[in-house]
Amino acid sequence: MKKAEGKVKEEFGKVVGDRSTEWGGKVDQLKGDVQKKSGEIEQDGRRDEGADEPASR
């Protein structure tokens, strides 16, 4: 969600000629990428935690 908001903010900054808003949008997009990646890593970690446990029957 953060990435999409950042893209809108970046484009708005371009249209109105506000470089600060444009770059703020780029930063928001990067934050969105980091947030997504950290969520993927967290899910992988949870998945791996259960891999060593024997299957319950």
Image: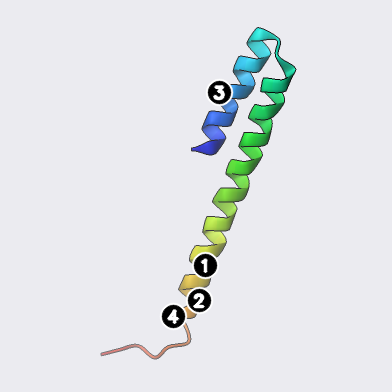
Question: Tags 2 and 4 in contact by the CB under 8 Å rule?
Answer: yes
> Which residue matches tag 1?
44
Question: Which residue type does callout 2 highlight?
Answer: Asp
19 sits left or right of 7 in the view:
right
Q: Residue furthest top?
A: 16
- Element on which disc 2 rests: helix
> Which residue matches tag 2?
48
- Sequence-first tag of 2 and 3: 3
Task: Give the answer, above or below, for where 17 lies relative to 10.
Answer: above
Q: Residue furthest right?
A: 19
Which label sits on residue 8?
3
In the depicted view, which residue is nearer to us: 48 or 8? 8
At a point 70% along the width and 14% down the height, the residue shown is 18
10 Å crowding of disc 2: few (<14), some (14-19), many (20+): few
> Which residue matches tag 4?
50
10 Å crowding of disc 1: few (<14), some (14-19), many (20+): few
At a point 61% along the width and 45% down the height, the residue shown is 33
As measured in the structure, the alpha-carbon distance from the residue carrying label 3 to the one carrying label 4 is 40 Å
- Sequence-first tag of 3 and 4: 3
- Sequence-first tag of 1 and 4: 1
